[in-house]
Image: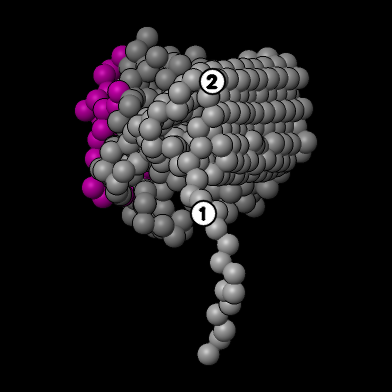
Amino acid sequence: MNIKTIVLAAGKGTRMKSNKAKVLHQIGGKPMLQHVIESARPLSSEVVVVYGHNGEEVKKKHSQFDIHWVEQTEQLGTGHAVKQASNNIAEDDIVLILYGDVPLINSSTLHKLITQVGTKSMSLLTVTLKNPMGYGRIVREGNKVCKIVEQKDATDVQLKINEVNTGIMAVHGKHLVNWLGKLNNSNAQGEYYLTDIIEMAVTEGVSVNTVQALDEFEVQGVNSKIQLNELERYYQLCKAKALMNLGATLADKSRIDVRGELTLAGNDVYIDINNVFIGAVSLGSNVHIGPNCVIENAIIADGVVIKANSVLENCVVGENSTIGPFARLRPGAELAKGVHIGNFVEVKKATIDEGSKVNHLSYIGDAEIGKFVNVGAGTITCNYDGVNKHKTAIKDGAFIGSGTQLVAPVTVEEGATLGAGTTLSKDAPANALTVTRAKQITLNGWKKPMKD
């Protein structure tokens, strides 16, 4: 069985009040269209995306996927959109039709849908709503679907029907191509409606099997920023519940955002309020994350404590290390076990070995710091000469006094001590004290300047 997925993604989304294509707006840090593509991929299907508005940007944002792109230059309805991809449909295909602005469709639901398709049957995804206002109603005779009636065309009796059409369906390729050729736009909107093929199926003796969506959010489309936000909050609540089911403790399930893949590599993780996780983040056992942190593409080992208001990006933190509060680990920061990075410390493209401490108001960039090094408050690695970056090396057991500037390239040898206020421009020898200070003088009789 060859499965082909056609994703309709050509709409501009006027009500989004945005210059970018509607399907590029994000849920959980990913474009809506990406969510749909990723739901279709487990079905081992070939994906065809019908694109239109801002099409080149849509294609660029999804270049990591193997997709056949088909342009719809005019938006003349869902039937017209699917017809643009008809040259890609073989007679023996099972064609799954999805929508780029319905991002939370589940792979398991789609699997159920395609199993209901045969040479004499098609399948339709429906959902039962307490308030079906605005949706096309599923009209049945007994248990059999006979047609879909749009809200404006429904009788008073039909308006009481709570089972509605989602637009998502799976159809045998031979039937679909045939029915697409019969569609017309003789309606108030002058558009070609894909839903018209339901009556064609019934007329030709093709049964319409239905599958119910898990809930209304799975099939909810996005046409406005309000709906986008509603789906975002639902998505984040699902992520939060999944984390708790895996054993994480959340201070508040409503105040966490996962914009990528957050992996729990161990047990007893605690996550305080207002934390944002971006990209691929892994948390080990007994990790404690304080409030208001942003963690992106990071590997956090067992026993790490990340204190409030810290930002970690493209970094690795070794076990039993402590970060923050108000610390920043920039790309390339790699910390071994038992490292302390304190308040208002920034680390960039630097390795810091076991047991070392950078506790206060310091910048460590383009550096290699050995084991059990103490870096005093206000230390700066002067790594940039205006053109090139240079490296600072601090060997095991060194002690860097407060207010020190390390003018790279420079090395502090093992066991060396730098006195407070030192500006180091030459290598500091091992097991010795190195100090650079101007002579202190006092000017007697000096008077403060006065305002004019």
Q: Which residue is mark 1?
A: 224
Q: Quadrant of residue 145?
A: top right
| Residue sitting farthest toward the top | 1
Which amino acid does the dot numbered 2 rest on?
A: Asn
Left or right of 77 on screen, residue 254: right
The residue drawn where x is 24% and y is 25% is: 88
Residue 20, x across and y down, in percent: 36, 51
216 to 115, vertically: above or below: below
Residue 79 lies in the magenta stretch: yes
Which residues, given as a range, are shown in magenta?
66-92
The Cα–Cα distance between marks 1 and 2, rounded to whole angstroms, is 66 Å
Circle 1 SS class = loop
Mark in the foreground, 1 or 2: 2
Task: Inspect this view and state whether residue 449 appears.
Answer: yes
Residue 429 lies in the magenta stretch: no
Q: Quadrant of residue 220?
A: top right
